[in-house]
Amino acid sequence: MESHRNLPTNTVGFCLLPSELIQYIFLHLTLPDIIRIRSVNKSILSIISDKEFVRNYNLQSASAFATWLFIYKKRWHGDAILQGFVDCSNQWFKILIGELLKKVVPPGEDVYLLAASGNFFLFALNTSQQLVSVNHVTRAVIKIPQSPLGPRGTSSWRRSGMKLFSYPPGSNNFQFLFAELNESRPILYEYDSQTDIWVSREARENDGILSHGFETSNGCTFLSARDARSGSVVIATGSQYETPIILRSRFSRAINEEGQLAIGFSRENSVDQLNIYGDGKMMIVRSDNIHDATRKVRVMTGLELWGLSVNGRHWEYITTVPNELIEQIKKPYGAMMGCLQQRDRIIRAILMSNLEGIWDIIWLNYDILKKDWSRIVVPECKMKGSNMAGIALSSALTL
């Protein structure tokens, strides 16, 4: 990884500090900085490689609830770049993953970032229609066997229907889940890197007899199999269920039935509602046309947050982003996409918009307990002249 910070100019004097103080300083660095300074000298490498330091750093990273935003962008006249931004930092980091992908990706292949979790990144290859996983710490690159769904292009992997897990955190194993309707039957497809095998399981109807309800906090994972203006078909899975469960979720109150709806990505002038799904939550982006005879432009007018009911049969309204915050973040756009994630009590929403080649990134957090919205200011990512080839939210990276 690379960042824009300068290396220490007096590394000898720094290394004369007590080792406990040096470890304390290193424990408060982001992972890209730690990886970068390993090559300064043998003394620093020894401290960072110490098993006790690695254990303490990984424990602190997990407890700090740091969240990473990853963007995979393609330059018109150069290689693709993976960049990461962590909510406790103020800069982007370049993650050196291009050389790793070249091990298995043929020249000219169209690569798209699907998901990230821990140290793992999952990419889809559009031409060969394969999946590739990359562990940027161990530098392991693996071609995943063909799924039971057969060859699939990048557009067939819906963000709302997939989830990547590294287990346990910091390990070299991961699991990839994907929900899909197969002949109108909701099916959960699961790949486990430890066995290198896909397993498919048909979901059963929700009989409504579960006592604890469907909540992310109860260990549920929610994957969308179909989304429409009137409601969704969602698969709920978790260790507490013998088989995945179908949630046919309708809206609990009337919503505007006029206009057009986009799921996950909007680029048409006539689309007035964009729905973004993740972890049993949904963000509705409402927008209006800007009257411009020379171009098709929209502007955001409101953001609503919805969630699945306890029994999973309804989408229930949670809250609306305050107007004063909307005024801070709204800009004209021609296309918009996003992702949504819940981790413990915080719901995180990323909205990426583009207008004539200029990208804008909005990061909003909602604290469920405090019922409070906040904004993470994301620095300029220098995406002008690049095509965006995937975004992902992920938990803290580990050593």
Image (cartoon, rainbow, N blue to C red):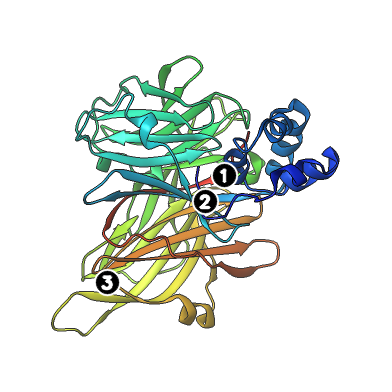
Numbered circle sitting on residue 258: 3
Q: Quadrant of the C terminus?
A: top right
Pick whichever of labels 2 and 3 is earlier in the sequence: 2
Residue on which the image places disc 2: 3
Look at the numbered disc 1 and give the secondary structure of its residue: helix
* Mark 1 or mark 3, whichever is nearer to me: 1
- Please determine whether, in this image, residue 321 is positioned above or below residue 47: below
Which residue in the structure is indicated by mark 1?
32
- Mark 1–mark 3 contact, CB under 8 Å? no
Neighbour tally class for label 3: few under 14, some 14-19, many 20 plus, Cα within 10 Å: few
Q: CA distance from mark 2 to mark 3?
A: 47 Å
SS class, disc 3: loop
Alpha-carbon span between mark 1 and mark 2: 7 Å
Residue placed most toward the observer, 111 or 268: 111
Q: Are marks 1 and 2 in contact (CB under 8 Å)?
A: yes
Estimate the x, y position of residue 53 in percent, counting from the top left.
75, 33
Q: Is residue 22 visible?
A: yes
- On the rendered structure, is 381 left or right of 259? right
- Left or right relative to 289: residue 14: right
- Tell me how many marks there are: 3
Q: Is residue 282 above or below residue 127?
A: below
Residue 79: percent from left, percent from top: 29, 43
Q: Amino acid at mark 2?
A: Ser
Q: Amino acid at mark 1?
A: Pro
Mark 2 or mark 3: which is in front? 2
